[in-house]
Image (tube, rainbow, N blue to C red):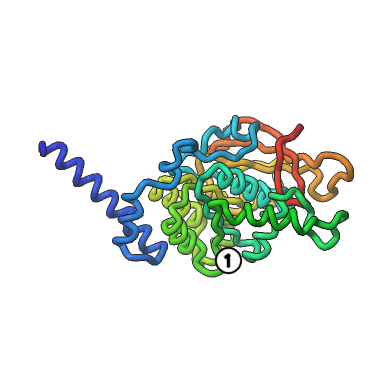
Amino acid sequence: MPESDDLMSRKTNGGLSGRAKRLAKQAGIPHTAALTSLRTPRAADRTPRRRAAATGLPGLDQLLGPLKPGTLTLLAGRTMAGSTALLLTIARHNARSGLSVMLAELQSTQTETGRMLLAAEASQDLGPTAAHPADPARLAAVATRLRRLPLRLTVPGADALGRLSAEAIRSRAGLLLLDDLGLASDFQQPAPPGAVAGALARLARDLAVPVIATAHLGPPRGLTPDPADLRDPHALQHADRVVLLDRPARLDPPVGQPDLVDLHVTGADGASLGRTSVRFEPESHRMTAAS
C-alpha cells in the first residue's frame, strides 16, 4: 500500500474508533459492538427505494429538502403548538416508507404513545370524550398494521440519550426522533446549556442518520416565534435546521374550521428559509397538508 494510502487508512480507522468509543460510552455497550455497528450499513442505506428521510408534508419537505444523514433538525413550539403531533407524523410517514425509525417519546408512557400513534394512523379521536365511538374491528386492523411497521419506541426514564443510542444501534435505525430536549436534559443532570443538542448532533454524525428533536420556546419576544426564543438557545449551535411552529389558535381552537399551524423554517443562524402551513388535527395527534 502506498504511504499516502496507508496514512489515510490509519486516519479513517482512528476516526471510526473514536466515534465507536463515544457511542459505547453513551449507549453503555461494548466498544466492539459500537465498532461493528458503525461498520455495518445503516438500514436507510439498505433500502433502495428510499435513501433519505422526509417529513411527508409536501410544503415542509420543499423547504427542508431531504433530511440528510448526520444532521440535527429541531421542531420548536410553545405548549399546544403541535410539535409532538408533527414528530409523530414524521415517524409514521418514514416507517410506512420502509425506513427503520427509533422514537424516544419522553413526554408520555409507551402505552400513551402507542395510543397516539393508533389515533393518528386511524385518523380517529380515541379520547374519552370522543364524539363518535371507534370501530373495534377497524382499530384492530390499524393496530396490526402499526405493529408491522419498522417503528420502535424507547421507554421513558433515566439516561434517555444512552437508551436512544443503544436502541438505535440494535435496531439499525435510519432515523432517530426525540421528544423533547428539555426532558432529556433533566435526565442528564448536570447538563450544561446546549449539551443535549450537542450529544444528539454527535450521535447523528456517528451513526450517519438524521436526528429530529422537539424543543420548547420560552416567552415570546415578538408576534411570531424566533429561534432566539428557544428555552435553550445554545442548542442552535448544534442544529442544522429549525422548524418554528406557530399555532395562532392554540389557546382558542376553532370549531368547524381548519386548525392551521404555520411552519417557519430557518437555518441555525436564524436566516429564514421560507414558510408553509399544515393542518393540525389535535384529536388524532397528527398533521396533514393544508388544503
Q: Nearer the viewer, residue 185 or 19?
A: 19
Dot 1 alpha-carbon crowd within 10 angstroms: few under 14, some 14 to 19, many 20 or more: some
| Callout 1 secondary element | loop
Residue 267 appears left or right of 276: left
Q: What residue is shown at x 59% (from left), y 56% (from top)?
A: 147
Is residue 4 among what the camera can see? yes
Front position in the image: 240 or 1: 1
On the question of residue 223 being in view, the answer is no
Residue at (43%, 44%) from the top-left corner?
Answer: 70
Residue 209 in the image: state x and y as whole percent: 45, 46
**In this picture, residue 214 sits left or right of residue 130:** left
Tell me which amino acid carries mark 1: Pro
Q: Residue at x 63, y 30 (%)?
A: 274
- Residue 48: image location, x then y, percent: 44, 37
Q: Nearer the viewer, residue 92 or 122?
A: 122
Question: Quadrant of the rendered structure where residue 270 is?
Answer: top right
Q: Is residue 264 left or right of residue 189?
A: right
Number of numbered discs overlaid on the protein picture:
1
Note whether 237 is above or below 171 in the view shown.
above
Q: Position of residue 19 (x, y in %)?
A: 33, 53
- Tell me the quadrant of the picture where the N terminus can be found: top left
Residue 291 location in percent, x, y? 76, 32
Residue under label 1, please give it. 156
Outermost residue, front direction? 137
- The furthest residue to the bottom: 158
